[in-house]
Image (cartoon, grey):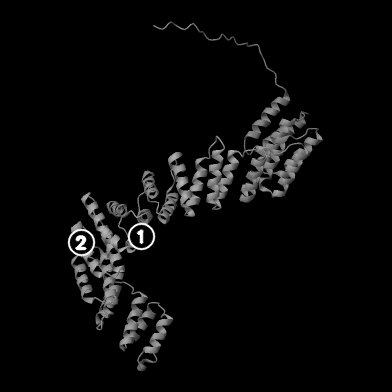
Amino acid sequence: MTAPSKITPWAFNQDSTFRGSVTQLARCQYEAISHAKGTRRLIPCLRLVREMKKEHVKPDLVIYNSLLACIAEEGLPLEAWAVVDDMHAMGISPDRQSYHHILHALRWSPLEPTWETLEKMAEQGFPPNEQTYALIIKRITATEGVELALQVMHEMAKRGFSPDLTATQDVIKLAADLHFSRLAIDLAQNFEAHSVRRVDGGTWMACLISSAELLYADGVQKCWEKAVHELSLTPDEGACIAVLHTCARHGLADLATDVIRVLRSIGVEWQEYHFAPLLEAFSRAGKLKEAFGTLHLLRSNGIVPRPETVQPISDLLKNDVDRVDRTWKILDELRDEGHSIDAAAINAIIDASITFGDLQRAIGAYKTFNDYASKPDIETFNLLLRGCIDANHRELGDKLLLDLKQAGIRPNALTYERIILLCLTQPTYEDAFFYLEEMKAQKFLPPLRVYEAIVRTCVAAGDSRYALALTELGQCGYTLSQDLRRYVATHKPSSQDDIL
């Protein structure tokens, strides 16, 4: 067993007869200092000074500096100088802290009084120190003078002073707010490289947001790593979306994936506009497998990808016809891994094939939907109809319309537009008017290009129905283009001179 300790507490016998004595000045000093440490305590401090005057208690430097602190907190430079004049009248010389209070009181005044105060400090033998420069920098950053703040920081370095953390963060945040993202990040990194102190998370987050707004990829990567992974900060949804836009522009697929993770961790419900930049980032990075896998993730979360969302994948495929062929291998791998192949993935291949003018390749892709346990959607048929228009292939267009009806898919405005344009590519274009009426019956407003195509076709064929199309065009609120107006005036039948 361990032997009991022989150490006993110190004996203490309280002296109940002791009574400390406090001078009246000491009591006033204590009260004045308490006022100076608080906020909005100028009135109580003035009352204290009035009581001291009534009781004939002579103030000292502590009392005056406390009064100056209260005045400075309210931003009253004239009153502060009045106190200094009273100090001189009482034979008390202001010290460095007195002038610092004056500088603080001048924070909302023009810069000239600040420089004058610094000159008076130098005349009294008080050259600027770190605190002086911190007050100057705070004053400058309040008016967004980032260049002048940098000059002051440079002067500090020449004199062997290091800027304090608060002043440095003020300059960094100002640079970030003014969209000098690279400067803000360089200042933060330089400060941390030469100081044991670290810039706070709010400052790094300001740099992150500024970099994201400017699509500054290097800055976004550095700030995200610092703020999210090192400091364990959580950006809000707005910051995450801004970062995602930068990822999309520069193909930062890994960072975009991490942003999506953060969005889920903060309880944000995933939306299509979160995944659109992720898909673009994957596409720019050439990561087609991840992009197609993301389409499945969208569907599994109840999000139907829009054609605009999948457009970056289509654009990537359009750059290289051989990449289109290699895409089938990627889809096979995803299918073998148990992933569902989204219709948008096959639509991207169809879109690229039509862009290459290869309608046969596009139809081949259309026939693979069953192989991947997927179903075509309205976008599939709209893309194929575009290919039919390019190839003037009316029979195939009719076959696609039949497939569309058998699949139970409701045509949209773009479907009617393209079938009308397809009909107008044929020598016999009567069906164009039928589909036009059906389009209007479905409450779809025909676009201007449909009417212009009808007018141009009718005029070229000497069909007087172009006049009806012109009338209906005007009723829809459209204006005929100058080019088509000249065409009609030049080629219209002579019996229709009064139409335009």
Numbered marks: total: 2
* Residue 445 at x, y percent in the picture: 34, 73
Residue marked by disc 1: 312
Residue in the image at 72% along x and 32% along y? 63
Residue 386 location, quadrant: bottom left
* Residue 488 at x, y percent in the picture: 38, 86
| CB atoms of marks 2 and 1 within 8 Å | no
Residue type marked 2? Thr
* Residue 128 at x, y percent in the picture: 70, 39
Residue marked by disc 2: 368
Say which label, 2 or 1, has the lower sequence index: 1
* Residue 219 at x, y percent in the picture: 48, 49
Report the side of 351 relative to 258 (left or right): left
Q: Spatial distance from mark 2 to mark 1, Cα to Cα?
A: 22 Å
Quarter of the image with the N terminus is top left
- Whether residue 42 is visible, yes or no, is no
Q: Mark 1: give few (<14), some (14-19) or many (20+) Cα within 10 Å.
A: many
In depth, the one of 352 and 130 nearer the eye is: 352
Would you place residue 406 above or below residue 283 in this image?
A: below
Q: Mark 2: give few (<14), some (14-19) or many (20+) Cα within 10 Å.
A: some
Quarter of the image with the C terminus is bottom left
- Whether residue 333 is visible, yes or no, is yes
- Secondary structure of residue under mark 2: loop
Would you place residue 496 above or below residue 343 in this image?
A: below
Residue 433 location, quadrant: bottom left
In depth, the one of 60 and 234 nearer the eye is: 234
Residue type marked 1? Pro
In depth, the one of 331 and 425 nearer the eye is: 331
Residue in the image at 53% along x and 50% along y? 182
- Secondary structure of residue under mark 1: helix
User: Farthest residue toward the front?
Assistant: 322
